[in-house]
Image (cartoon, helix red, strand yellow):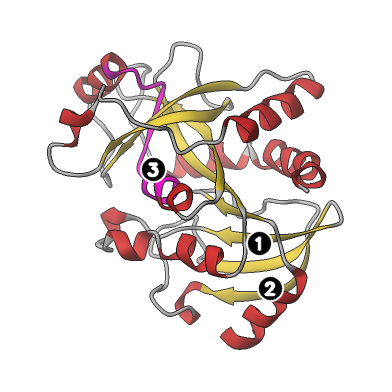
Amino acid sequence: MPSLSAFQSAVRANQPRLAVVLGSGLGSVPHQFVELASLLFADVPGLMTTSVQGHSGSISLGMCAERPLLVFRGRLHFYEGHSWDRVTRPIQWMADMGVKTLLLTNAAGGIHDSLGPGDLMVLRDHLFLQRPHSWKAVGQPRTSPYAPRFIDLLQEAEEHRGRYLMAGVYAAVTGPCYETPAEIRAFKAMGADAAGMSTAAEAQMAAALGLEVAALSCITNKGAGLAGGILDHREVLANAARHAKRISDLLETILPRLG
């Protein structure tokens, strides 16, 4: 692998407009990707090796649909014991590298009646429930960090392929344990359509830095109490992998349209 300075020089030379952060089980995305250089999280000041299965913890620069693309394979989570500064450090770093547009992905549990394993949801907003007493802010006026133009672009790309992409609200919770049925009922009452353990802080940081942001939730299971069985991370990884081709197709479609 190249040194940090060599990798940063390669990124600046190729000037990728879009960066994508890949959630659990999505490490093979994008399929049509020609890697030019890669770096480990641990080689970037302020980052460190990931500890969650399904997150390799590397950054790749390459070409997709004849456009430069920066791919973060995995992320750092608050529940791993990291500070919020470290969780959002990749966002700060990519902004420093000149990235203007960010697509976040995650694995999530479906809460909306129409969302189940294999479905995909684009975020129109989120509930940031990862801080003490954060539920008190639910319903208060605020601006969503997710860019309407980017949401429309993703929905149009899916419609072109004959698929419907629901725009919904994501409940970001602390983890690492899965939610209880009572919590899922509460999130639904708050207006959430899916729940997971990432994305919200990254999206807010990116929007604050001036990046155009969108996020996709890969529905890997129904929320606790909405289906039979016990939730398991192996199931999450296996079901997330089912979304890899669909997200790869989306990237290939939207990259030429991002300018």
Residue 11 badge: 2
Tag 2–tag 1 contact (CB < 8 Å)? yes
In reply to whether residue 201 is colored magenta, the answer given is yes
State which quadrant residue 13 falls in.
bottom right
Rounded to the nearest angstrom, the CA distance separating label 2 from label 1 is 8 Å
In reply to whether residue 47 is colored magenta, the answer given is no
Q: Nearer the viewer, residue 100 or 234?
A: 100
Residue position marked by numbered label 3 in the rendering = 200
Q: Nearer the viewer, residue 251 or 27?
A: 251
> Residue 129 appears at what percent x and percent y?
25, 37
Which residue is rendered at x = 51% and y = 49% of the image?
23
State which quadrant residue 151 falls in.
top right
Q: Nearer the viewer, residue 223 or 84?
A: 84
| Residue stretch rendered in magenta on the structure | 190-204
Which residue is rendered at x = 87% and y = 56% of the image?
66
Secondary element at tag 3: helix
Residue 70 badge: 1
Which residue is rendered at x = 50% and y = 44% of the image?
237
